[in-house]
Amino acid sequence: MRPNKRPAPSCVFITGATSGIGAALAKVYASPGRTLILHGRDPERLSRVRLTCEDRGAHVEICRLDFSGLSSVFIALTALADRHPIDLAIVNAGITHDIGPVGDGESWEDIERVMTINANAAMATVSALLPSMRQRKAGQIALISSLSAWYGLGLTPAYCASKAALKAYGEALGGWLAPQGIGVTVVLPGFVRSAMSDRFPGPRPFMIAPDQAALRIRNGLERDRPRISFPQPLALGMWCLALLPAGVSRWILGRLGYAGWPVPN
């Protein structure tokens, strides 16, 4: 059985911490006596997040890795885990792509890049950090997936596939690692205000601010929940789409503007 509440983490590692959910989570976890290790691709934005977190009393280290090179990522994060006993790893880094304004589809290069960063790099991150956690019989991993993992949207096929892979991976890990004292949580957010969500070519209902999302995630992680999904109306709708016959779900998404080109006005 999982404990009802986990102890506050002393060392938190967050990937994709330059903006959106990642930056908001960094600020939520920033507090005196806590070490934050923040990863991001944009040095300027990452430095701003770092300064904010340091102003709140946290000790902050910066981790700059190119997640398209998985072998180097694995080696670097293995060394990082040897230097720091990471209590909580929030695997959040991700990118998106869509089928284009007239539905031309995604190129193989775009598909490969989305899958590499969103799914393969996330798994490489977990694989690098796990040996240290398993040795200590302690630690927690949060995988930031998406509500689109329940049922793929025709507008963003590769993104949905990557998030579905992350959902299944996290659920499988949770069953394996729970008896070893390691918590695994799959986070399934809906639309959170960010540059990534701004690029989404379809409707964006129930949009919430990053700081609201970060608080919901932190509260769920404190309670060691296997799954955190929000906002509830959209989470319920996506869950229902996964249960309905595929033809019905596809018709519903088409009527709502998510099936693909042409996108209704």
Image (cartoon, helix red, strand yellow):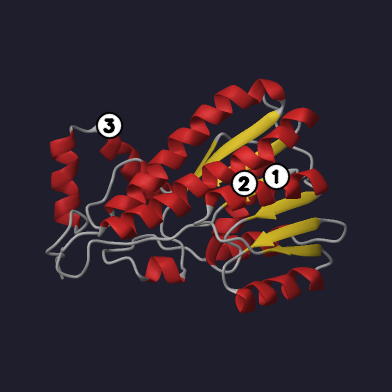
Residue at x 36%, y 49% (from the top left corner) = 234
Secondary structure beneath label 3: helix
Mark linked to residue 74: 2
Secondary structure beneath label 2: helix
Amino acid type assigned to the residue bearing label 2 in the image = Phe
Circle 1 Cα neighbour tier, 10 Å, few/some/many (<14 / 14–19 / ≥20): many
- Look at mark 1 in the image and give the residue it sits on: 78
Mark linked to residue 243: 3
Instruction: Name which quarter of the figure residue 135 lies in.
Output: top right
- Disc 1 from disc 3: Cα separation: 39 Å
Return the x and y of residue 120 as percentages of the image width and height: 47, 45
- Disc 2 from disc 1: Cα separation: 6 Å
Secondary structure beneath label 1: helix
Contact, mark 2 vs mark 1 (Cβ under 8 Å) = yes
Return the x and y of residue 38 as percentages of the image width and height: 68, 61
Mark linked to residue 112: none
